[in-house]
Every structure is written in structure tokens, then in C-alpha cells.
Image (cartoon, rainbow, N blue to C red):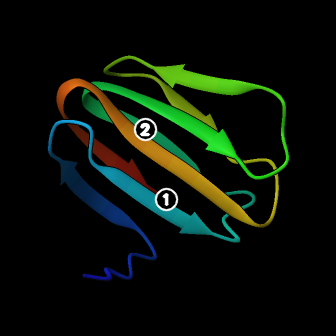
Amino acid sequence: MQIELRSGAIRLGPNQTLRVLDGAGSTVCAVEGSVWITEENQPRDIVLEAGSCYQLQHEGVAVVNSLAGEAAVSLE
């Protein structure tokens, strides 16, 4: 299944992944739960707890993965 999301919110099941393509400048927020973010060819990964946000820095693929259960994320 492929979901195209320009902005909005989505709920991720346990260990479910959301791929963001060419999202530099977009902001990912953990609305509920915790998420792990990694950006293509970048050595540093990001972990967000509920209520925190991160602005994607690089073009290419960013992977957003739920940690320790379900999570809800927004993308703006």
C-alpha cells in the first residue's frame, strides 16, 4: 500500500514505517507515542517523544518509524 501525504496526521501501528520523499523543510511532530527518524545518508538519527517536533534537513528519503507501540505523527 502507498499513501501520499503532503501534510496532515497519520497513526502508525507498532513498528510501522512512514517514508517521506524529498521532505527537506517539512516538520514532523510526534502527536502521540514515540518515533524514530532517519534521513538518507545522514549519520545522526532523531527520536521524538510525544509533543516534540523535528524539521527535516535533507532531500531524499526520510524514514519515520513508531517506537514501543503505536504513534501518531503530523507532517507540515
Classify 10 Å Cα crowding around label 1: few (below 14), some (14-19), many (20 and above): some
Residue 39 position within the rendered picture, expressed as x and y whole percent measured from the top left: 71, 47
Q: Quadrant of the N terminus?
A: bottom left
Indicate the position of residue 24 as horizontal and vertical percent values.
75, 60
Amino acid on which disc 2 is placed? Cys
The residue under the point 77% across, 26% down is: 44
Is label 1 in contact with label 2 (beta carbons under 8 Å)? Answer: yes
Depth check: 26 or 3 in front? 3
Q: Which mark is residue 29?
A: 2
| Residue occupying the point 62% across, 54% down | 62
Q: In this rendered view, identify the residue nearer to me: 1 or 70.
A: 1
Give the labeled residue for mark 1. 76
Q: Residue 64 vs residue 3: left or right? A: right
Q: SS for tag 1?
A: loop
Residue 22 lies in quadrant: bottom right
Q: Earlier in the sequence, mark 1 or mark 2?
A: 2
Is 16 left, or right, of 64 in this rendering?
left
